[in-house]
Amino acid sequence: MLDNNMQAQLKAYLEKLTKPVELIANLDSSTKSVEIKQLITQIAALSDKITVREVRDAALRTPSFLITDPGAANSGVNNRGVRFAGSPLGHEFTSLVLALLQMGGHPSKEAQELLEQVKSLEGEFHFETYYSLSCHNCPDVVQALNLMAILNPNVRHTAIDGAIFQNEIEERHIMGVPAVFLNGKAFGQGRMTLSEIVNKIDNNAETRAAKALTERDPFEVLIIGSGPAGASAAIYTARKGIRTGVIGERFGGQVMDTVDIENYISVIKTEGAIFAGALKNHVDDYSVDVIDGQSVTKLIPATAAGGLHHIETASGGVLKSRSIIIATGARWRNMGVPGEQEYRTKGVTFCPHCDGPLFKGKRVAVIGGGNSGIEAAIDLAGIVEHVTVLEFAPELKADAVLQQKARSLKNIDIILNAQTLEVKGDGAKMTSLDYKDRTDESVHSLDVAGAFVQIGLLPNTQWLGDTVARNRMGEIEVNMRGETNVKGVFAAGDCTTVPYKQIIISAGEGAKAALSAFDYLIRTSA
C-alpha cells in the first residue's frame, strides 16, 4: 500500500503528534475494505500514538474509517473527528496526513482569527464531500472541512470517494467534484477555501468582515487579486518597505485550477496548488496584509494625485490606499447558450481532471479545439467511452503534436465548423447538446452525459464599470509601465491588454506594476 519511501516520510510527520489518535474502521470483506485496513494498519505501525480498532455498523458507510480521539463510542457517529469513506490516496493522501496531525495536536497554519471563528460556530453542521482521487480541487475543500470538524465538536465531516459510492453519485445527481452537502442538502460545488465555507454558514461573518475592513488604516499600495501577478506585486512593494495589502477571493487565483505547470523557468514541473502554496509562503515572508475570501465590487478613484483611492467590497467594507494595482486575472469563458447554466455541475463542467472520473464509461463532448480542449479530450479518452470535440473554426488551434495524438485515439471524434446551440437535459442532469454545422446550417444532436467547456478566458474586470479604460474584450488598457488611464491605478496580468496569458508573464507584469506604483508614490505627496 505505502512504499518504504512514503512510510519513512509519513513516520517523520507523525513524530509531530502531541496526543493520541484513534482510527475506528467500519469494514466488510470487500476489496476496498481490505485496502483500507492495510492502509490504516501501516499508519498505526509508524507511531505509538495511533491505535486502530474495527466496528461493524450498518448505519455507517462501508468501507470507511473515523479519525478521532481515543475512547470514542463503537460507532463513532456522534463523536468528534473526520471520516473517510474510501481510501484517501492520490490527491487526498495529503488530506489524510493533515487530519492525523491536526487531530494529534499539531496546529494549523490558518490565521488565528479564522480558527477562532471556526471554534465559535454554533449549531449542528454535518458536511459530506464527494471527491475523486484525480481531482486537484478536492483536497482544499476536504482539508478545510476536516479542520472544522477537528476544531469544533458541532461540526462533522465525511469525505466520500465518489468512485466507490457510485450509487450516491447517481441518487444525488452529482456531475462534478468536489460536491459538498450540509445536513443532507446541497451546499457548494467546486473549490472553496476555509474562509469561504465559514463565512457562508456564519450569519454574522459579513458584518464583522465589513467592520474589520473599514477600520484598517490606509495602505500605500493595495493589490486587488492574489494570483501570480498580485503575489509578485506584493513581494516587490513589501521589499520597498511600504505598507502593502492584498485582497482576493482565493490566494493563487486561476493557478489553483491548473494541474501541471511545466513552463515556469527554473521549475521543471509542479502542480497548480503547490505553486500557489509557494506563492503564499513567499508573500507571508514579508509584512503584507493578506485579506482572503473577499471580492471587490467598486473602485472610487482619488479626486487628486496623491489622494486616497477607495475600494468597496461585497461584504460592505471599504479599504483606502494611495495607489492601487489591479491583478484580478481571468475566468473560464461560458458558451452562452440555453441550458448551460441550468446544467452547470450537472453535466456542464470545466475541469476534465476533477470531473472526468464521474463520467466513466459515458459519452461526453469537449467544446473547443485549442490546446486546452485537445488536452482535455486526450485525458478523457482514457476514462470515458467516447469523446466528441466540437470546434467552431474550420481548423483546430491546438499544437500539431496534440492534434496528432488526439486523431490517433479511436474513441475521439473531431467535428470542425461546429457551433454549439443548446444544452439539453431531463431537469436533473444533462442528456444531450445541439450544434449547427456552419458549412450547411444543418442542426445535429449529440447524446452526451457531459460537456467540458474549453473555449478560453474572460478578464475579471466587470466590477470596474467605466472607472478605468478597457478594450472591447474587457481587458484593462495599460502602457509599458503597467499604468492605466487613472493616476495611481496600475494593472497587471491576465486582466490586462498585455498579450500571452502565461503565469511567468503575469508574475513579471506584477513586479513591473509594483515598481511603477513605488515610483508614483515617491513622486507624489501624501
Image: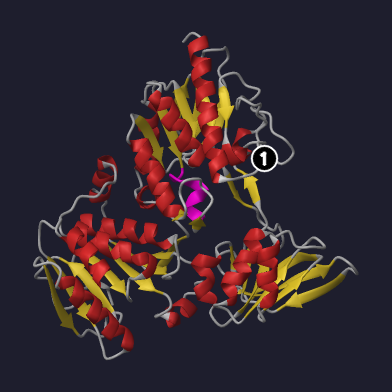
Asked whether residue 363 is in view, the answer is: yes
Residue at the limit of the structure toward the top, as seen here: 525
Q: Which residues are magenta?
A: 249-258
Residue sitting nearer the eye, 241 or 306: 241
Q: Would you name the residue on which mark 1 appears?
A: 499
Indicate whether residue 417 is drawn in magenta: no
Which coloring applies here? secondary structure
**Residue depicted at 20% across the width and 50% down the height:** 107
Where is residue 160? Give x, y as percent.
36, 72
Q: Is residue 340 visible?
A: no
Question: Residue 232's x, y, as percent?
Answer: 47, 35
Q: Which secondary structure lies at badge 1?
A: loop
Q: Is residue 461 above or below residue 197?
A: above
Q: Would you call the spot at circle 1 few (<14 residues within 10 Å), some (14-19), or many (20 or more)?
A: few
Observer-nearest residue: 457 or 272?
272
* Left or right side of 523 for 282: left
Q: Amino acid at mark 1?
A: Pro
Q: Nearer the viewer, residue 217 or 136?
A: 136
Q: Quadrant of residue 445?
A: bottom right
